[in-house]
């Protein structure tokens, strides 16, 4: 299963490791699911996670982002342009579409209106975990 993680989900995973976003990050680290990234996404992950207001361990950020960089599926660029309510979300949708993600996971589904997402499935972390096959996420 291939996913794109919106930055807000990754931040939540770092801040609350036992939360639903934290469970999703663990599935990525355990390589039970594949994460799709591009250079924009990786840069945004690093920039946001490094903000002083989150007070996160820089070593932990570096370790996890290095893993994601090395193990993640690199999304090819798309020539098509998209107009989402928040233009900063566009690279996430582009990555999902270009690498054929099964789902784009975000805490802000309203930023990804169905009519603008070209058929891409968009879910919250809770919706995603609920729909995962038991073989991937048996501890419900």
Image: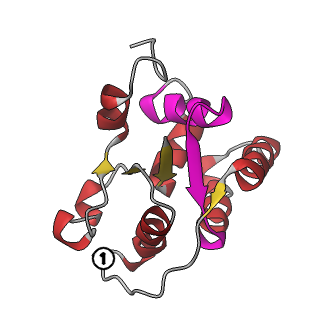
Left or right placement of residue 44 versus residue 122 in this view: right
Question: Is residue 22 inside the magenta stretch?
Answer: yes
Q: Position of residue 85 (x, y in %)?
A: 27, 75
Q: Position of residue 86 (x, y in %)?
A: 34, 74
Whether residue 51 is visible, yes or no, is: no
Question: Which quadrant of the figure contains the C terminus?
Answer: top left
Q: Is residue 69 above or below residue 24?
A: below
Q: Circle 1 sits on which residue?
A: 84
Q: Residue furthest top?
A: 139
Residue drawn at the location 45% of the way across and 72% of the way down: 94
Instruction: Out of 56 and 107, give the one closest to the viewer.
Output: 107
Instruction: Out of 81 and 23, give the one closest to the viewer.
Output: 81
Q: Position of residue 23 (x, y in %)?
A: 51, 28
Task: Please provide the residue range marked out in magenta.
Answer: 19-40
Residue drawn at the location 60% of the way across and 37% of the way down: 28
Q: Secondary structure at mark 1?
A: loop
Whether residue 81 is visible, yes or no, is: yes
Q: Position of residue 56 (x, y in %)?
A: 68, 44
Question: Is residue 118 inside the magenta stretch?
Answer: no
Q: Is residue 41 above or below residue 133?
A: below
Residue drawn at the location 58% of the way across and 44% of the way down: 34
């Amino acid at each position: 299963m291939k996913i794109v993680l919106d930055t807000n989900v990754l931040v939540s995973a770092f801040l609350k490791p036992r939360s639903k976003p934290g469970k999703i990050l663990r599935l990525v680290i355990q390589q039970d699911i594949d994460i799709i990234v591009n250079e924009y996404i990786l840069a945004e992950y690093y920039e946001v996670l490094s903000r002083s207001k989150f007070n996160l361990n820089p070593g932990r950020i570096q370790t996890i982002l290095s893993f994601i960089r090395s193990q993640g599926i690199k999304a090819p660029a798309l020539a098509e342009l998209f107009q989402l309510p928040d233009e900063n979300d566009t690279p996430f949708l582009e990555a999902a579409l270009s690498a054929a993600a099964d789902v784009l996971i975000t805490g802000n589904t309203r930023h990804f209106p169905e009519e603008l997402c070209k058929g891409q499935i968009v879910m919250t972390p809770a919706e995603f975990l609920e729909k995962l096959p038991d073989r991937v996420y048996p501890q419900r």
